[in-house]
Amino acid sequence: MENVNLSFQIILSETIKIGELDRRILFQNPVETKQSNGELLISWNSHGYRWAKVEPFMATEINENERLSVYSKATFTVRYDSALNEKMRIYFDGKIYNIQGYTEIGRRQFMTIEAETRQIANALTADDSSLTVDSTLLKTDQEWQ
């Protein structure tokens, strides 16, 4: 029986340790509304917070039309949740990350999410004009303890 427990621990250590999920990220769903003039308006509703491991892995500066754009990519690792998808976005550390894709880790134990954000001239532009955060989901640091 000891060998079974040892091999199970080895498998988990190759994936992720639960203590590494130490950042709170907010997932948001797009909501499409047709206005009276026929124009489609996209707003964002809060789906919920998750504990995550956040690993930035790339940043690139590009000069676009005489304006400096900074593209940043990160990997977010969270517990597996079948409700999460590529149509959503992530709000973390004052930035909005558009989800590029995800990979399941283990047998639906965890998932890694590849996401990208873009800043232009120090102003976030990845759909930040429609950022809405459901205040019922916001909690203080004391409430999380």
Image (tube, rainbow, N blue to C red):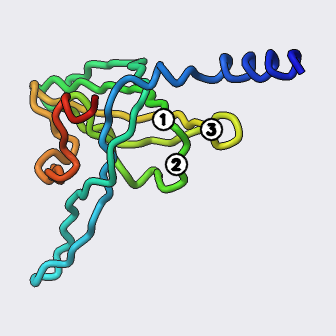
Q: Measure the C-alpha gap from mark 3 to mark 1.
A: 9 Å
Image coordinates for residue 35, horizontal then vertical, percent: 13, 78
Q: Mark 3: which secondary structure? A: loop
- Which residue occupies 20% across, 48% down? 127
Dot 1 amino acid type: Val
* Residue 138 in which image quadrant: top left
Image coordinates for residue 93, horizontal then vertical, percent: 22, 28
Q: Measure the C-alpha gap from mark 2 to mark 1.
A: 8 Å
Q: Earlier in the sequence, mark 2 or mark 3?
A: 2
Q: Measure the C-alpha gap from mark 2 to mark 3.
A: 9 Å
Contact, CB < 8 Å: mark 2 with mark 1? yes
Q: On screen, 36 above or below 105?
A: below
Q: What residue would you read off at disc 2?
A: 81
Image coordinates for residue 68, horizontal then vertical, percent: 16, 23
Dot 2 amino acid type: Asp
The dot on residue 109 is 3
* Mark 2 burial class by Cα count in 10 Å: few <14, some 14-19, many 20+: few
* Mark 1 burial class by Cα count in 10 Å: few <14, some 14-19, many 20+: many
* Residue 120 in which image quadrant: top left
Q: Mark 1: which secondary structure? A: strand
Q: Is residue 81 left or right of residue 2?
A: left
Q: Is residue 126 left or right of residue 80?
A: left
Nearer to the camera, 35 or 93 = 93
